[in-house]
Image: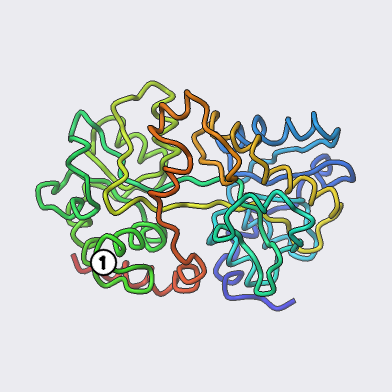
Amino acid sequence: MTITRRQTLLGAAGATAALALPRSLMAQSGQILHASWGGGVGDTWTGAFAEPFTEETGNAVRIVEVPNPEAQFRAQAGNPQYHTGIGTFVQGVNLMRDDMLETFSIDEIPNMRNIDEKYWLKTEDGRLAGITPYFAYYGIAVNTNEASMDDFGSWKNLADEKWAGRLGMTRPIYLSTYDLTILSKAAGGDEFNTAGGMELLKGMAKNVLNVSNSLAQQNTMLERGEVAAMPFYSVRVWSLNEAGVDYVKMVIPEEGALLLPYVVVAPKGVADRELVAQWLNFIAGAAPQERGMEISGYIPASNEAEASDAVREKIGMSFADLRAKLYQPDWGHIAAAQKETVADIDQMLANL
């Protein structure tokens, strides 16, 4: 097997994270093993997807929480121990490019017909390499005890000198993928033309109190008012609000927020392929995606999904209206340019 550039970059860390499963968790006929991030994501997959699928079909799905499903897939290439796993769209693109994913026809997963094709992870010949279960979005989280939501009506406000020492920021690996992309759009460019976005990112970086290393740290910074605002994930703010932290609010600036599609993929050579296709088709349906929204705030990808009155009140609009405010970039280009973009951002930050 040819070792790819990304496999080399994963190195020992990826291999260590993907040690062989205990025999009790090995893939078995009639049971789906799904690799998921931990915490709230695992709970969502259990309650919204796995348990209902088991009740409907009689086939068990076990959610196995791991630090990085992509690393598991790479370490187990040629001998997959999981049937499916969740990932970001960029991770899905990289796995697909490295020929590590099982592909399916649309006839095998017909529920994908109810999801806009621009959100599909597909090969050049049109086969599905991943299923889109839901979205989050990347906007600006504001502690309303420290600032007004109106203070961040534009992404450009993050570069305003008045916020010196008052903002939070994530690491360059995510800045390259998310922050730079949406800041470039705000500056009149896009993921292909990022010069203006880099200038805005530089201005924001000058205002940053702390570059956080984890989502837990970012949550704490916002909740305690250590920062007034920072670019952040909608589902994290949803979780804070559900926990009673109602003074942290999500702002979609006038230029829009960045749509973050997730994908569920199956490793190449997966066992029980027919059952896996049935599971993937279930994931692509409206009902489990609606349950996922109720549990953790993920936006359904299916055009047939409808918001309950309670959900509509929380998000202030329908799913269709919300999706219309979100920017979907070319994730393939972003994934291909990521290494170079991270290096450029590292250099920019070092020169501040």
Q: Quadrant of residue 42?
A: top right
Instruction: Please determine whether, in this image, residue 134 is positioned above or below residue 129.
Output: above
> Does 335 sit above or below residue 151?
below
Q: Residue at x 37, y 39 (%)?
A: 217
Q: Residue at 53% x, 61% y: name it.
A: 90
Quadrant including the C terminus: bottom left
> Across the whole image, how many numbered discs are drawn on residues?
1
The one nearer the camera, 48 or 70, is 48
The residue that appears at 18% across and 59% down in the rendered structure is 203
Q: Position of residue 305 (x, y in %)?
A: 58, 38
Image quarter in which the N terminus is found? bottom right
Residue 288: quadrant of the picture:
top right
Q: Is residue 57 left or right of residue 48?
A: right
Left or right: 143 in relation to 244: left
Question: Horizontal and vertical percent for residue 213?
Answer: 38, 48
Which of the pair 162/48 is nearer the observer? 48
340 vs 141, left or right, is right
- Disc 1 is placed on an element classified as loop
- In the picture of the structure, the residue carrying the numbered disc 1 is 188
Q: State the residue at coordinates (74%, 52%).
A: 110
Residue 317 position, x and y percent, is 41, 35
Q: Residue furthest left?
A: 162
Amino acid at pointer 1: Gly
Residue 74 in the image, given as x and y percentages of width and height: 67, 62
Q: How is the image coloured?
A: rainbow
